Image (tube, rainbow, N blue to C red):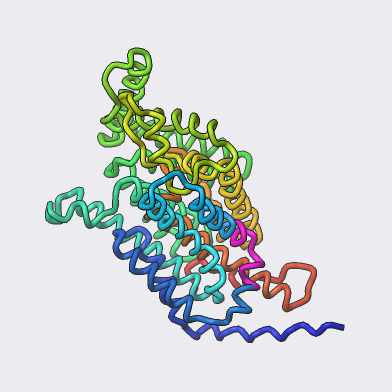
């Protein structure tokens, strides 16, 4: 009989490692300016390389299908550099941005203790509260004008992450505990900022989608009706009574009308029409995909290939099509799209192995990115992509712990998870 190697004893829950602190700092920076996130990424990777215990880490990586899919997608982007039609600068630039996919398996492998995972999630919400407070301060001109662009991230990044943060705190409010009303109040405070102060239409759409998701998670089929009605009422109020949201809706309608006129007459251009440009980018990206459907034109090739396609026209060149599904497919073909969707589906299924609140929170991350990626290349984008991979890694690290505990117990039924209260505020 073959002897199984003895498992390394887990570290005590109270023991900290540099990688744990780095993960907490990384989560804290997600809603905050880019420079902090870049520093956190370097610290996390360095601390991971110093963490050792490679045998245990390999077992954790193998136990979570999402980690395998993320690794496969990253490898496909690497392979895409070998046949890319892009310039050396374009290839290295895009590859550097997609390299953040490595953070999914790194966090799954490295974060072995629920205490530190919970602290990282709490740190994210703390960062979101600070970012929202800064947004209000800027709105009331209580910060110097010279700092307006630096205290709060770009509006798409801010809207995307704040929509999820509001959802996450609203989900926490459904859990029993003395803090539930505080979580609900902060969620409403964030949502009001998102709809009344922020200009990101992507954030509007995401928050409405997350309202439907939350209602479905709590009330199942009837929740879909409740959520849809709630989202419709909130949208009606925002787009009629909130000046910023109303203006953004009116501008969207004007953009679409201008795009339709441009398509009929081909007179002028769409250089200042954000929705019209997106529609044009999407149409031309589909034309590129039709030319190279299987493996695409390679990592970082879109700008050059798009430029060739629209040469001699009044069409603006595109660096990316503002749609992650199209961006990935142009570069890596249906192979890349299948890997991207496979990673999302695997993450959704892996999340079902978690206790209810962690499962729901993970599904909220997936819906946030899935919806936002319809209008932006969120995996390619620095901040939104970092948010996606870090939150996936943090939450799915618990799945690796459950799988390891299950293997050690030798049981055929899942054990009672020690991570069951990772997000409920207990420490």
- Nearest the camera: 145 or 208? 145
Image quarter of residue 21: bottom left
Q: In this image, 418 relative to 162: left or right? A: right
The magenta stretch is 59-69
At x 46%, y 59%, the residue is 99
Q: Is residue 143 above or below residue 9?
A: above
Image quarter of residue 33: bottom left
Q: Which x, y percent locates residue 153?
A: 29, 53
Is residue 395 located in the magenta-colored stretch of the structure?
Answer: no
Q: Is residue 31 above or below residue 324?
A: below
Q: In this image, 198 relative to 310: left or right? A: left
Q: Main secondary structure of the magenta part?
A: helix
Q: Which x, y percent locates residue 296?
A: 53, 41
Q: Is residue 315 above or below residue 94?
A: above
Q: Which x, y percent locates residue 272?
A: 26, 30
Q: Residue furthest right?
A: 1
- Nearest the camera: 353 or 52? 52
Q: Is residue 219 visible?
A: no
At x 68%, y 70%, the residue is 403
């Amino acid at each position: 009989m073959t002897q199984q190697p003895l498992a390394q004893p887990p570290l005590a829950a109270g023991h900290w490692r540099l990688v744990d602190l780095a993960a907490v700092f990384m989560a804290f920076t997600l809603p905050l300016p880019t420079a902090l996130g870049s520093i956190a990424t370097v610290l996390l990777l360095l601390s991971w390389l110093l963490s050792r215990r490679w045998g245990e880490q390999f077992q954790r990586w193998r136990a979570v299908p999402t980690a395998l899919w993320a690794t496969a997608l990253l490898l496909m982007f690497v392979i895409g550099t070998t046949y890319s039609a892009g310039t050396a600068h374009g290839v290295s630039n895009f590859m550097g941005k997609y390299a953040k996919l490595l953070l999914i398996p790194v966090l799954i492998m490295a974060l072995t203790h629920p205490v530190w995972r919970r602290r990282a999630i709490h740190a994210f919400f703390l960062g979101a509260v600070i970012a929202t407070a800064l947004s209000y301060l800027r709105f009331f001109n209580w910060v110097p004008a010279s700092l307006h662009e630096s205290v709060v991230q770009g509006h798409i990044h801010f809207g995307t992450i704040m929509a999820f943060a509001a959802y996450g705190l609203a989900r926490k409010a459904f859990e029993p505990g003395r803090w539930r009303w505080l979580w609900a109040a902060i969620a409403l405070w964030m949502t009001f900022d998102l709809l009344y102060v922020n200009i990101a239409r992507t954030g509007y759409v995401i928050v409405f989608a997350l309202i439907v998701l939350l209602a479905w998670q709590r009330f199942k089929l009837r929740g879909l009706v409740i959520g849809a009605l709630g989202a419709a009422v909130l949208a009606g109020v925002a787009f009629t009574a909130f000046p910023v949201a109303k203006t953004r809706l009116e501008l969207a309608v004007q953009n679409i009308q201008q795009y339709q006129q441009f398509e009929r007459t081909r007179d002028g251009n769409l250089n200042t029409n954000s929705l019209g440009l997106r529609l044009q980018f999407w149409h031309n990206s589909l034309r590129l995909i039709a030319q190279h459907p299987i493996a695409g034109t390679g990592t970082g090739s879109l700008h050059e290939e798009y430029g060739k396609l629209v040469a001699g026209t009044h069409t603006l060149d595109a660096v990316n099509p503002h749609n992650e599904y199209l961006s990935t497919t142009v570069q890596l073909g249906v192979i890349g799209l299948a890997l991207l969707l496979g990673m999302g589906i695997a993450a959704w299924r892996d999340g079902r192995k978690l206790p209810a609140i962690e499962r729901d929170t993970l599904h909220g991350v997936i819906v946030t990115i899935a919806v936002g990626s319809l209008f932006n290349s969120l995996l390619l984008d620095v901040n939104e992509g970092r948010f996606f991979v870090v939150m996936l890694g943090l939450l799915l690290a618990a799945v690796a712990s459950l799988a390891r505990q299950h293997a050690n117990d030798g049981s055929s039924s899942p054990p009672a998870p020690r991570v069951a209260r990772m997000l409920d505020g207990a420490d």
